[in-house]
Image (spheres, rainbow, N blue to C red):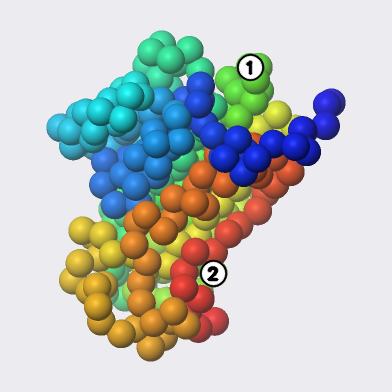
Amino acid sequence: MTEPSPTRTPAELFDLSGKVALVTGGSRGIGRAIVLGYAAAGADVVIASRKLAACEELAREVESLGRRALPLACHVGHWDDLDTLVDRSYGEFGKVDVLVNNAGMSPLAPSSAETSEELFDKVVGVNFKGPFRLSSLVAERMVTGDGGSVISISSTGSLRPSPNFGPYAGSKAALNAINIAFAQEFAPKVRFNVIAPGGFYTDISKDWAIPGEDVPALLLRRYGYPHEIVTAALYFASDASSYTTGSLLRVDGLGVV
């Protein structure tokens, strides 16, 4: 194995030119910010979410940056959808260098005893079963090619769970765990890392995360903006993190532990 060049500039280390990134849940919020950040860094992007129209709209923005984009409808909780997603991504671009497991759901439960089986299965299916399957499919292809990077968007809820989010916290904790297992299984050609965001200002959180309001529970006294997670996603996607795998990075304004 050759030693990475020690003379590359920071701009060169974070450059994604010639790379292909697949981002689930990529049409809005954190996923949308990552898609645009990767495109600005030079990557072509597969944008996947349940709503094709939203993916197509974002694809046009990516193309305006001079990059190629493939918008695809996909429900990550359905394994047949994931097989199709991978086949179409490789059919269009011939490879995937970066996979971002960003799609997720975080519904409130009235109590643990009142959590329905349907709700439990849906949360686990989207937050853990889907990323497990998609990571497996893509990493197998990465191993036979030039390698790659798989990034899973978890949550600080997996580290500090609260009762009303039991299934959500458990599914994200499972995602953290499988990241370490995959890092071992697909080493050394494929790196696996996790980003654990705290609260962010997105359309999903608009009822409780209001820009400008003081948040005493956080050291930075506010929630995050989607663009503030892009640097972490760029780090794990690029050669800047060439010696980092099996790790978890919190991006949360440091909430009280």
How far, Cα to Cα, is label 1 from label 2? 34 Å
Say whether residue 174 is left or right of residue 49: right
Spot occupied by residue 19 in the image (x, y as percentages of width and height): 51, 25
Q: Earlier in the sequence, mark 1 or mark 2?
A: 1
Is 122 positioned to the left or the right of 228 in the image? left
What residue appears at the point 39 percent right and 82 percent down from the top-left corner? 221
- All told, the count of numbered labels is 2
Q: Which residue is labeled 2 in the image?
A: 159
Q: Does residue 133 show up?
A: no
Residue drawn at the location 78% of the way across and 38% of the way down: 6
Q: Position of residue 168 (x, y in %)?
A: 40, 61
Are the two marked residues, 1 and 2, in contact with CB atoms closer than 8 angstroms?
Answer: no
Q: Amino acid at mark 2?
A: Leu
Residue 166 placement, left or right of 135: left
Relative horizontal placement of residue 135, taking residue 116 as reference (left or right): right
Q: Residues within 10 Å of mark 2 (few under 14, many from 20)?
A: some
Q: How would you rate the neighbour count of disc 1 (Cα within 10 Å): few for under 14, some for 14-19, many for 20 or more?
A: few
Residue 38 sits above or below residue 44 on the image: below
Quarter of the image with the C terminus in it: bottom right
Q: In the image, what residue type sits under mark 1?
A: Gly
Q: Residue furthest bottom?
A: 216
**Secondary element at image label 2:** loop
Q: Position of residue 5 (x, y in %)?
A: 77, 33
Q: Position of residue 140 (x, y in %)?
A: 60, 24
* Label number found at residue 145: 1
